[in-house]
Image: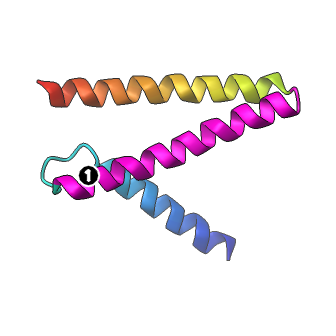
Amino acid sequence: MEIIWEFLFELIVDGALEAFPDKKVPLPLRIIAGIILIGVYGGLIGLCFFLGIHDRNWIVLILGVIILIFTIFGIRSVYKKHKH
């Protein structure tokens, strides 16, 4: 059962990653893909921050900050590509 959930989750996230920047995909679907990506990465970052602060685990907190930085840079690069 775990393998099925992992496969479905990977399929959804990879599909959203491919659909979000593609201009051939209709705008409402790209918006939904963006919301899915923000939810997944926001949840992961929030979980890392929560566990890092709650358990006083600096490694998990730093991991959350690193994921947040990479996410911000990724969003900026996609935004700059579509802005031009």
54 relative to 3, above or below: above
- Secondary structure at badge 1 equals helix
Image mark count = 1
Nearest the camera: 82 or 27? 27
Q: How is the image coloured?
A: rainbow
1 relative to 74, above or below: below
80 relative to 28, above or below: above
Q: Residues within 10 Å of mark 1 (few under 14, many from 20)?
A: many
Residue 81 in the figure: left or right of residue 65: left
Q: Residue at x 85, y 33 (%)?
A: 54
Q: Residue at x 67, y 77 (%)?
A: 1
Residue 73 in the figure: left or right of residue 7: left
Q: Position of residue 16 (x, y in %)?
A: 36, 53
- What are the residue bounds of the magenta stretch? 27-56
Residue 32 in the figure: left or right of residue 11: left
Q: Residue at x 25, y 58 (%)?
A: 29
Q: Residue at x 15, y 26 (%)?
A: 83
* Residue 38 part of the magenta segment: yes
Instruction: Report the predominant secondary structure element of the magenta stretch.
Output: helix
Q: Which quadrant does the C terminus fall into?
A: top left
Question: Which residue is label 1 attached to?
Answer: 30
Extreme residue in the bottom direction: 1
Location of residue 51 (image quadrant) = top right
Q: Position of residue 79 (x, y in %)?
A: 26, 28
Location of residue 32 (image quadrant) = bottom left
* Residue 37 part of the magenta segment: yes
The amino acid beneath tag 1 is Arg
